[in-house]
Amino acid sequence: MKQALSIYVLVLAGTHLAFLMQGYVGTAEILFGALTIMALMISAIFLWLWGMRMSPLSLGMAFSWAGSAMVMGWGWLSAQLGRPAWMNENELLLLLMGLLMTGAVLHFEVLETSFGYRRGAFLLPVAGALLFSSLLLALVG
């Protein structure tokens, strides 16, 4: 935990320094780009771990990190291209979000077996999240 907190402090200090030098937009674009690239690399490593059968959680992690990379990358690319109209409300983004959703569902499936629950119980938190999100949209929208 001490190492993680130390890294977090260094990241925050570096982010603040970048903010002072580049401003918000420059710092955000640098971070989104770096995070997108690192997420793709992490996804590839987890896919390799899954292929080597080193961890049951690896496939969910591979999907989650790939989905995160694609969703962040979409926003990053959109900003770099000046927010073109063809990227607004493009169904391709929803397909990329499907990678992230698949990773989340796979995580809940692994957690189900880790906690010893019956088959299919992992769908309850997934359905709950979808229901809550739908209700919030109905109330606000």
Image (tube, helix red, strand yellow):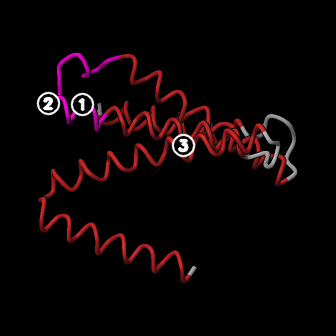
Of residues 37 and 122, the one nearer the viewer is 37
Please state the extent of the stretch shown in magenta in the rendering.
75-90
| Chain-order first, disc 1 or disc 3 | 3
> Residue 111: x percent and y percent?
75, 49
Figure check: 51 above or below 34: above
Of residues 110 and 62, the one nearer the viewer is 62
| Residue 64 horizontal side relative to residue 75, left or right | right
- According to the picture, the residue beneath numbered tag 3 turns out to be 65
| Amino acid on which disc 1 is placed | Ser
Quadrant of the image for the N terminus? bottom right
Q: Residue at the location (46% across, 26% down)? A: 96
Of residues 50 and 125, the one nearer the viewer is 50
Distance in Å between CA atoms under marks 3 and 2: 25 Å
Q: Residue at the location (56% across, 47% down)? A: 42
Q: Which mark is residue 78?
A: 1
| Amino acid on which disc 2 is placed | Gly
> Residue 8: x percent and y percent?
42, 73
Q: How many numbered marks have been drawn onto this rendered protein structure?
A: 3
> Residue 59: x percent and y percent?
70, 38
Q: Residue at the location (73% across, 46% down)? A: 57
